[in-house]
Image (tube, helix red, strand yellow):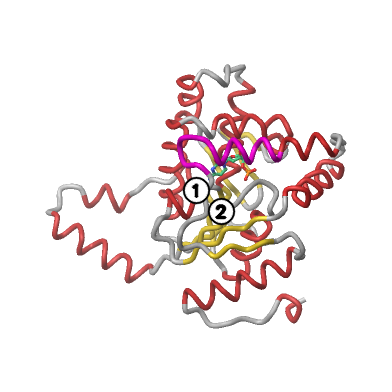
Amino acid sequence: MTGRFFRPGRWTSHDLNDRRGYTAWRLSLQFETRRMISAEMIITIDGPAGAGKSTAARGLAERLGFEFLDTGAMYRTVAWACLERGIDLSDSEAVAKVAQGLTLTFEGESVFCDGQNVTSQIRTAQSSEAASIVAAVPAVRHEMVRLQREAAANRNVVSEGRDQGTIVFPDADCKFFVTADPKERAVRRHAELVAKGEDEPFDDVLRQIIDRDERDRTREVAPLIVPEDALEVDTSSKTPAEVIVDLEATARQKLGLASSTSLFEQA
Ligand code: DC
């Protein structure tokens, strides 16, 4: 995987600041010009936990030469920081304060929180549970959405999460909703945990997936729903490489990009 850089927390919107004070017509003219020059394209991939979104999004971004934005990692990092600081997760105000004060940095596949590498810490079962809770706090979502939009400005991005095609980038050029049967998703998650030496009983993993789906789907803010104009992709009986090939073909067609050599040819 190529090392791509994403630094949402550090990005400043120089363009926007420079434009303050211009008249409205000048603003819109510059915006249009910027769009024409940069021609940024956004692909969103939403879906439930363990459906293979991350692998698909990373692979697709790499194949297209786009940046990859892992928004789940952002919520996980907020959750981890709260746990580290002993914050009561039911105290929404305290959780929101943590979210607003963090500097989140992505470097390739590594995630940094205020300069500390937290890549493995945010993937534990405890962080997953906590992420689902902090993600339901409106002020946390507000802050993450702001950072996500800032991160994607003027870039070609594959953005993965739960609300990317619905809330964060409703005008995205291409939207996917990646899903899989809950049992299949539990099998995958369980295998990941075993590989990391965290051998949780399978039934517990399955229950956590079902509970998390329920929380993500029924929460008041930004519930997990299929965006109206998204293509649904069921990965239950597909390999990750097959999913990437499918997404790439559709994305290239939708975005008007020339087709590329297939994954299999490339190897
Ligand atoms: O995709 P993931 O498992 O890394 O996401 C972790 C949690 O964050 C999960 O409970 C859903 C939530 N999330 C969200 O609410 N919105 C997003 N855009 C991404 C993740």
Relative horizontal placement of residue 34, taking residue 183 as reference (left or right): left
In the drawing, does residue 177 fall left or right of residue 100?
right
Q: Which residue is mark 1?
A: 163
What percent of the width, then of the height, locates residue 153? Answer: 40, 55
Disc 2 and disc 1: Cα gap in Å? Answer: 7 Å
- Which image quadrant is residue 235 in? bottom right
The quadrant in which the N terminus is found is bottom right
Image label count = 2
Task: Choose between 226 and 119: the one closer to the eye.
Answer: 226
Q: Residue at x 58, y 62 (%)?
A: 232
Q: Are marks 2 and 1 in contact (CB under 8 Å)?
A: yes
Amino acid type at mark 1: Asp
Question: Could you tell me which quadrant the C terminus lies in?
Answer: bottom right
Q: Which residue is mark 2?
A: 46
Q: Dividing the image into four equal quarters, which quarter contains ligand 1?
A: top right
Q: What range is drawn magenta here? A: 209-223
Q: Quadrant of residue 79?
A: top right
Q: Position of residue 197 (x, y in %)?
A: 87, 38
Q: Point out which mark residue 143 bears.
A: none
Q: Nearer the viewer, residue 210 or 9?
A: 210
Q: Residue at x 63, y 34 (%)?
A: 116
State whether the magenta stretch is mostly helix, strand or loop: helix
Label 2 SS:
strand
Distance from mark 1 CB to nearest ligand 1 atom below 8 Å: yes
Q: Residue at x 69, y 39 (%)?
A: 210
Cβ(mark 2) to ligand 1 < 8 Å?
yes
Q: Tell me the SS state at disc 1.
A: loop
Q: Amino acid at mark 2?
A: Asp
